[in-house]
Image (cartoon, rainbow, N blue to C red):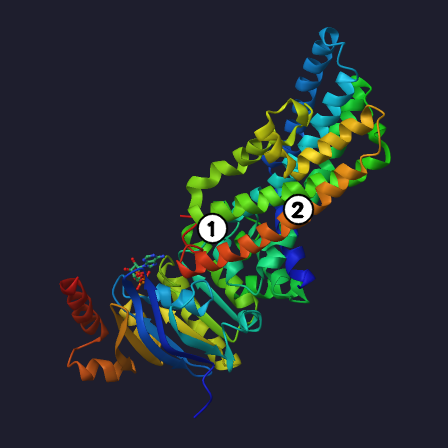
Amino acid sequence: MKLHRITALLVRHLYLYRRSLPRIMEIFYWPFLDLVIWGFITLYLARYQSQVPGFVTFFLGALILWDMLFRSQQGITIAFLEELWARNLMNLFASPLKPSEFLTATMAMSVMKVTVVSIVMAGSALLFYSYNILIVGVWLMPFVLNLVITGWIIGVFTTSLIMRFGQEAEVLAWSMVFLFQPISCVFYPMEVLPTWLQMIAWVNPAAHIFEGMRTVLSGGASPLGNLAWAVCLNGAFLVVVVAWFYRTVAYCKEHGLLVRVGE
Amino acid sequence: MAIPVLKASALTKRFGDFVAVNEVSFEIRPGEILGLLGPNGAGKTTTIQMLLGLVTPTAGSIHMFGLDLSTHREEILQQVNFSSTYISMPQALTVEENLCVVARLYGISDRARRVNDIIKKLEMEEFRSKITRKLSSGQMTRLTLAKAFLTEPRILFLDEPTASLDPDIADKIRSLLKEEQRASGLSILYTSHNMREMEEMSDRIIFLQRGRIVAEGTAREIIDRFGKADLEEVFLKFAREQRQAS
Ligand SMILES: Nc1ncnc2c1ncn2[C@@H]1O[C@H](COP(=O)(O)OP(=O)(O)OP(=O)(O)O)[C@@H](O)[C@H]1O
């Protein structure tokens, strides 16, 4: 891997964000709006749901952590879509850039996005609801890292689908992650799911992180077990989706799709 | 005779049952401009895309600088570049920003100077700070040519490079290509539907028809072999034959 090729892609995206209001809004405005709207709804519901202990804490924490996963996935998929929209894929794939460097650059983009979004959301939560995400304590960092990796997995998977099926599959960039939301048990514990769905949720690394978050916030036991599951599942899925991405690139070259994907 | 910088052997591409390129073999020598001619759908773009590693050949091999493209992609593509009227570059970036990104991508060390030089060379000063989206199609073509020259390639693939340029700029680009060929020994694979341009530019020409090479030689040799007045007439003969066959 060559660092200069990875930084070339990063610089290209930073140039893009520097003068594009809609792209800046995607990082600042929407996460802020999400938090404000859902935050106030949470406060309102909390009045009537007092029997659920720590309702506000759970809900706001979940909201912020979910957004990190979402933005991490978007960081990957949108970076690819930007190249597709710009009809720049041919320039990239006919250069010495390797698929691994392309993926690394999009992952770095996703980390940058998540960092900014986290600051916006955590800051807004503190300002509007006096809610400090740091109450999750030392577990916060490992939780976030795992959610970012789950975001990458969904992002690389979605990117491969768009590459394979072309622009018609573009809508997946925004919708795919929401397929995972019900089985990520973001706002409710896994036990509320029907048994068959619990089995599916069990293999979703994000579900273990949100379970872990609730364990920590309710002052319960250490979430090490949840974290271990999340790490193992993330590791396994990351290997699988990256391998699949490579296969997709090879398939597209075989069928001449790489040069037609933007058409 | 000099060792070829590019050697394509029995290059074949099938898309399902359709054979787009059929056992095509050719070489490009150092400092040579090879014209690739053929009617629409003859397989020119598919051939170039295989040479750029964008499309995997069904059969055959590609060697550049003595290296096999299937195993030395990175080393080869570092020394190769291309320009086509059909590609674009990131629209929201300025011309200069786009060139800087390309310079980084190819690991060019003195980026600012090289970008400046190429902007001057292609007379792009007046639109160097313009957002790419706002360029005219001729300016866009110049930008894609600039990105191709910027990396100082040893082989350049040019797919209809002068198609959207006004005659004055097109003439300048042709002179520039000739100049680079002489000065740095640049080898060029060139496609164009402008037969006069092909005659003027190419040291040698390959004619493709339905994915196969049907004629090869200097423009003069080809014209004489088919007993035609000029390259345009030879082209029309092959184009009509292809149309009748399909
Ligand atoms: N990805 C693909 N899948 C199926 N068929 C393809 C694909 N790419 C090209 N073809 C077919 O292969 C043939 C050769 O196409 P190609 O674009 O190489 O021709 P060309 O000589 O460059 O034509 P033009 O002068 O119009 O650019 C055409 O019939 C085209 O439809």
Q: Position of residue A198 (x, y in %)?
A: 62, 30
Q: Are marks 1 and 2 in contact (CB under 8 Å)?
A: no
Q: Classify mark 1: helix, strand or loop.
A: loop
Q: Where is residue B238 in the image (x, y as percent from the top left)?
A: 19, 70
Q: Do labels 1 and 2 share a chain?
A: yes
Q: Classify mark 2: helix, strand or loop.
A: helix
Sooner in the amino-acid sequence: mark 1 or mark 2: 1
In the displayed structure, B215 sits above or below B104; it is: below
- Please tell me in which quarter of the rendered image ligand 1 is found: bottom left
Q: Mark 1 points at which residue?
A: A87
Q: Residue furthest top?
A: A48
- The amino acid on which the numbered mark 2 sits, given as a three-letter code, is Met
Residue at (51, 82) in percent of width and height? B66
Position of B50 compared to A78: left or right? left
User: Can residue A35 be seen at all in this image of the molecule?
Assistant: yes
Q: Name the residue under label 2.
A: A109
Q: Which residue lies furthest to the bottom in this view?
A: B1
Chain of residue at mark 1: A
Q: Nearer the viewer, residue A152 or A187?
A: A187
Position of B52 compared to B243: left or right? right
- The amino acid on which the numbered mark 1 sits, given as a three-letter code, is Arg
Q: Spatial distance from mark 1 to mark 2, Cα to Cα?
A: 19 Å
Residue at (72, 35) in percent of width and height? A209
Q: Where is residue B139 in the image (x, y as percent from the top left)?
A: 46, 54
User: Can residue B123 be seen at all in this image of the molecule?
Assistant: no
The crowd level at tag 1 (other Cα within 10 Å; few <14, some 14-19, many 20+) is many
In the displayed structure, B193 sits above or below A133; it is: below
Q: Quadrant of residue A63?
A: top right
